[in-house]
Image (cartoon, rainbow, N blue to C red):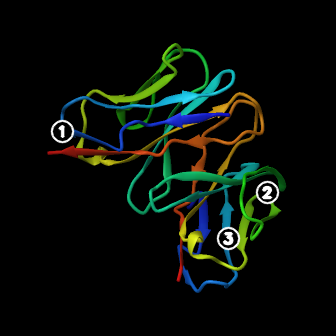
Amino acid sequence: DTAVSQTPKYLVTQMGNDKSIKCEQNLGHDTMYWYKQDSKKFLKIMFSYNNKELIINETVPNRFSPKSPDKAHLNLHINSLELGDSAVYFCASSLPGTVPGELFFGEGSRLTVL
Amino acid sequence: AQSVAQPEDQVNVAEGNPLTVKCTYSVSGNPYLFWYVQYPNRGLQFLLKYITGDNLVKGSYGFEAEFNKSQTSFHLKKPSALVSDSALYFCAVREEQAGTALIFGKGTTLSVSS
């Protein structure tokens, strides 16, 4: 039973299109994240939500809009896709709290913009 | 601002030999430190963490890491490497302050030869 699941796993699209990536976790965690991994494998935090509330919003273009309909889901919508958006996007979740627990990652969604 | 450095892009060891993957960090205040492993086309998996207490932390798959406050380091170690340990390893740090994100190093590729 997958703990953090992302769909789709692969996404190939044209520049200028709008696309969404969905993420669901069944761990009962309150906090969810989106990370971007570029072609050099560098991981960068994009957003973090705690119980549907945005708590971290790094320097990300406003073409990227996260949405959390409930604490088990965190979706990522991207408008007007650009070549530089090509990357692997990872969703993760964790228990909240001052002392951090580990992050549980999904398998990633590989986005290719042509 | 918090940061983490992994000075080696790649570490090569022979099976059965000890391995070390280096990590240094910079934070304001006390750090929370983590190691993750990523296998090809997979999400990241948690290995171990240092929050407080004993400087030597033991984790999954026989890995351990030593927290050294004076050297601001958190090197990952294993006494005897396996070929199956070959993967990409990430060190990560978070500040003590709540609401901050986990920041990852650029990763170190470990290659264990038989």
- Give the mark nearer the N terminus: 3 vs 2: 3
Q: Residue type at mark 1?
A: Glu
Q: CA gap, disc 3 to disc 2?
A: 13 Å
Q: Tell us which disc is closer to us: 1 or 2.
A: 1
Circle 3/circle 2 CB separation < 8 Å: no
Label 1: few (<14), some or many (≥20) within 10 Å?
some
| Residue B20 placement, left or right of A32 | left
Farthest residue in the left direction?
B114
Q: Is any atom of residue A51 visible in this view?
A: no
Q: Residue under mark 3: which chain is it in?
A: A
Q: Chain of mark 2?
A: A
The chain letter under disc 1 is B
* Residue lying at 43% horizontally and 26% vertically, measured from the top left: B65
Task: Say which residue appears at 71% left-offset and 53% top-offset.
Answer: A32
Q: Check if mark 3 and mark 1 are on a common chain.
A: no
Find numbered disc 2 in the image and state the secondary structure of the residue it sits on.
loop
For numbered disc 1, what is the local secondary structure?
loop
User: Pointer 3: what residue?
Assistant: A22
A13 versus A100 height, above or below: below
| Residue drawn at point x = 64 percent, y = 37 percent | A101
Tell me the number on the disc at residue A71: 2
Q: Are marks 1 and 2 on the same chain?
A: no
* Residue carrying label 1: B15
Report crowding for label 2: few under 14, some 14 to 19, many 20 or more residues within 10 A (C-alpha): many
